[in-house]
Amino acid sequence: MDYLKIANSPLMWLAVLPAVLLTFVQAALFTKRAMKTGPKIGLTKEQMKNAVTASAAASIGPALVIAIGCLALISAIGGPMAWMRLAYIGSVGFELMAANFGAEAAGAVLGGEGMDLSVFAVCCFTMCISCLGWIIMTGLFTHKLGAISDKISHGSATRVAVLSAGGAIGAYAYLVFDKILPASGASADGGNIIASVVSFLITAVLTIYGKKAQKAWCSKWGMTIAMFAGMIATGILI
């Protein structure tokens, strides 16, 4: 049986529903606590109303970005799991990376050759446990993270940002080069190379333009635009 039939089955939708509902409960609890605490710290009802309205409006853009970017995740692991993971993490890039690690560990290509129910299960397992690191660390060591950060960075916020960015760049660079280097078995038609190069160029242009022109939409929509541009270019040129 095609693994996507199971991945998109009613049973999967039912299985992820409690987890998604938990995020709604959490949001309701935080909202209730905020509305109760606001007046105690001197906020007026009008200020709180404006904050709610502004927050709701600001959430539309990121939600659309996630919804569009989610298409790639849905095509690989199905709608239910994509819905659940993005309800918790909200990062398409992170979930694609985690699912890809799981598929590669099982000897398959995410959403492609070798994908079956067993590989799908490995992908789901990898996606769910890959975020446990920071959850455990923040739960157990939040009160010490400030001191650790200061020790590593010697009090330099710039150094912390550089170290964090370096880790992310290294992870994504591995994913890209693993697909385009000849030693990795990249496709002979060059589709992987075209998609990677076009996506990189679009990302670079949007990043530079966004910083120079102070356009926030570039950082919010950049990954989605680059991803679709890479797919379109590959479809046209191959």
Image: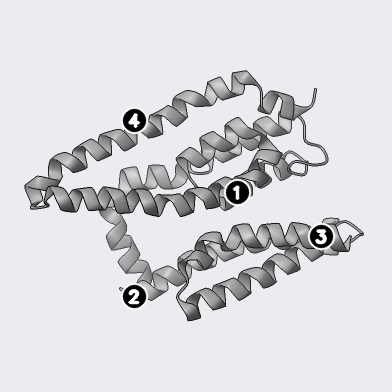
The Cα atoms of the two marked residues, 3 and 4, are separated by: 43 Å
Give the SS element for disc 2: loop
Task: Name the residue beneath numbered marker 2.
Answer: 156
Question: Can you tell which of label 3 and label 2 is closer to the viewer?
Answer: 3
Question: Can you tell which of label 3 and label 1 is closer to the viewer?
Answer: 1
Give the SS element for disc 4: helix
The Cα atoms of the two marked residues, 3 and 2, are separated by: 42 Å
| Residue shown at 31% from the left, 54% from the top | 54
Task: Name the residue beneath numbered marker 1.
Answer: 68
Left or right of residue 81: residue 34: left
* Residue 228 % position (x, y): 69, 57
* Residue 173 % position (x, y): 65, 64
Query: Relative to residue 219, is residue 38 depicted above or below?
Result: above
| Residue shown at 70% from the left, 40% from the top | 76
Whichever of callouts 3 and 1 sits on the residue coming sooner in the sequence is 1
Task: Name the residue beneath numbered marker 3.
Answer: 234
Does residue 178 appear in the picture of this structure? no
The Cα atoms of the two marked residues, 3 and 1, are separated by: 19 Å
Give the SS element for disc 1: helix
Task: Name the residue beneath numbered marker 4.
Answer: 25
Quick check: marks 1 and 2 in contact, CB under 8 Å? no
State the image quarter where residue 171 is shown. bottom right
The Cα atoms of the two marked residues, 1 and 2, are separated by: 37 Å
* Residue 210 % position (x, y): 51, 74
Camera-nearest residue between 122 and 61? 61
